[in-house]
Amino acid sequence: MAGTDTSIKIELRPSPAVILCEPQLGENIGTAARAMANFGLWDLRLVRPRDGWPNEKAVAAASRADHVIERVRVFETLEAAIADLELVLATTARSRDLQKEVIGPDVAAQRMAAQVAAGRGVGLLFGREKWGLLNEEVALADTVVTLPVEPAFASLNIAQAVLILAYEWRRQSGQAETLPFGSGLSEVAPKSELVGLFEHLEGVLDQTGFFTTPEKKPSMVHNLRTALTRGSFSSQEIRTLRGVISSIDRRHQRPNPNRQK
């Protein structure tokens, strides 16, 4: 879905931080940043990124999520990365031998929304590409978040996981109540215009001999009107259809030089 509009100013609303623990690939950092930007998150924190920071591959993969990339903060320890947060949610795809509450993405988003609305700091913690979070890292979190994935194939890449949680956050925070654009459908034409279309079409069909059997004409007219009514045409569409009918009528009236006398 392409749709970046640089003419719209990005508003950095209060939102959860995303913490990536020892991310290995710049591309994954960049795509995670892009996923965050899609749903209004902007506070990205990195704990000991393998290839250092800044990272050109991350910038390229972020696809112009510059407001996220430019605000990235790098920390040497997870403890430092979450020091200013009151609620930390650790994401994992596998069970841990820890006494931690486990919740789904919708409940997680509800709790995050309530905490952020109260002015508290919230963080979403994601692990390494190959093996996720260590138990001692999960132990620092308040709650574990997992997704209702297929148990036999539960692993998601970082950007996918960030995208799902960011989407749920946006829904539960009330920012998804209005879509960014509407359908753009015109109002349905008044019935008087639709009746005019019926009469115009039926008159031309009469002239061209379409109704070959008089006793069947009422049912044929009924079927035509039923089909056209389902179209919910706008006034412009009705004018276009009547123009088509008029063109066909004029062609029928013109002499055909190829017609045998």
Image (spheres, rainbow, N blue to C red):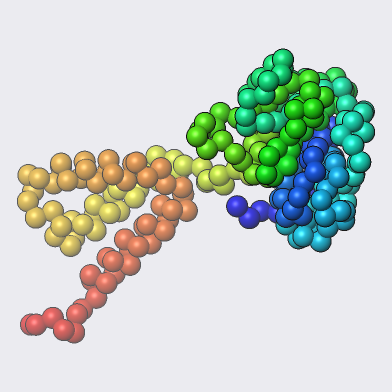
**Above/below status of 47 relative to 213:** above
Q: Nearer the viewer, residue 67 or 179?
A: 67
* Along the line of sight, the residue nearer the viewer: 101 or 16: 101
- Tell me where residue 136 sits by quadrant: top right
Whole-percent x, y for residue 67 in the image? 84, 49
Q: Taking the image as drawn, is residue 172 in sight?
A: no
Q: Is residue 245 left or right of residue 136?
A: left
Q: How many marks?
A: 0
Residue at 35% in and 48% down: 196
The image shows residue 206, relative to residue 180, as above or below, that is: below
In the displayed structure image, the side of residue 148 where residue 141 appears, left or right: right
Query: Measured along the vertical axis of the image, is residue 4 above or below residue 116?
Result: below
Image point 64% across, 44% down: which residue? Answer: 157
Residue 31, given in percent of the width and then of the height, sits at 71, 50
Nearer to us in this view, 16 or 247: 16
> Which residue shows up at 60% across the image and 52% down it?
1
Farthest residue, direction bottom? 257
Lateral position of residue 135 relative to residue 146, left or right:
right
* x and y, in percent, of residue 254 in the image: 24, 75
> Residue drawn at (79%, 39%), measured in percent from left and top?
21
Q: Position of residue 205 (x, y in %)?
A: 21, 57
Residue 100 shows in this picture: yes
Q: Quadrant of the C terminus?
A: bottom left
Residue 13 located left or right of residue 202: right
